[in-house]
Image (cartoon, rainbow, N blue to C red):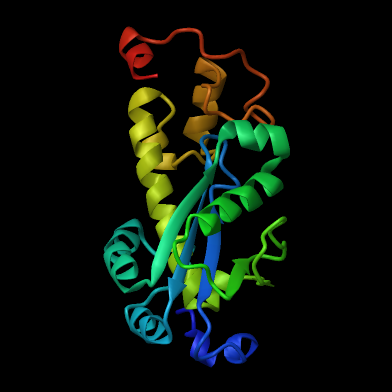
Amino acid sequence: MVATSRLLTPEAWEYHPVAEIAGVDEVGRGCLFGPVVAAAVVLSPQACAQLQSLGVTDSKCLSEARRESLVEPIQRLATDYALGLATVHDIERLNILYASLLAMSRALRRLSTLPDLCLVDGNQLIPHLHLPQRTVVQGDRIHIEIAAASILAKVWRDRLIVRLDRRYPGYHLARNKGYGSAAHRLALQTLGPTPQHRRSFKGCGSHQTRATVTSAQQNLQ
């Protein structure tokens, strides 16, 4: 299902046409490995319409190739966009919910254009954000702004995990993107967790830290 333009979304109608509206979404909450990544995207009504015609929707509904192909038009048509992340340390310190909200807050704070309204995917408001915000459950299937943010966050995080796969071989990260696939869980049992694994997550904390690291890996760390 293609996300609808904000022009067609009743809950955002009162802000049209002068308000700067940002959509924000995060990716990676359910992973065993790596950070949570968020993106914030500010779009004009015209950009929303153009991206809707290109098929922008929830990143989970798109193939990897399709997501990659949409990055350039999203970045080109956006009034502004920014990325933010919460590290594994943040996740362990705060918990995954608050780390996800932190990543979204960091993305919004990196925008050069402060929006008049933030549309937040999900049902949790972002704490300590001194901007008007509205939560939208399944917002990445309703608002183009949130859908565009979900695509940028997903593509950026996937690219990061592919790079980290070279640093931490054996976990099949380039394929599973940090999620708990059978091969990933088996590798955890055999190799133990890396510093980028979330120890508080089931399946990550019951093993010793990976002891055998090649000299090449050490040079990369």
Q: Is residue 99 left or right of residue 143?
A: right
Q: Is residue 105 above or below residue 92?
A: below
In the rendered view, tell whether residue 84 sits above or below residue 34: below
The residue positioned 43% from the left and 68% from the top of the image is 148
- Residue 67 position within the rendered picture, expressed as x and y whole percent measured from the top left: 35, 62
* Quarter of the image that includes the C terminus: top left
Residue 14 higher or lower than 166, as above or below: below
Q: Is residue 169 visible?
A: no
Q: Residue at x 47, y 32 (%)?
A: 183
Of residues 23 and 155, the one nearer the viewer is 23
Where is residue 150 drawn, in percent x and y?
A: 48, 62
In terms of depth relative to the viewer, which is nearer, 92 or 175?
92
Q: Please state which of residues 39 and 151 is positioned toward the viewer in this rendering.
A: 39
Q: Position of residue 68 (x, y in %)?
A: 30, 59
Q: What is the tally of numbered marks visible in this picture?
A: 0
Residue beneath the point at 57% across and 14% down: 209
Q: Which of the 4 image quarters holds residue 46?
A: bottom left
Query: Is residue 116 shown to the viewer in this render?
Result: yes
Pinpoint residue 121: horizontal percent, then vertical percent. Answer: 61, 66
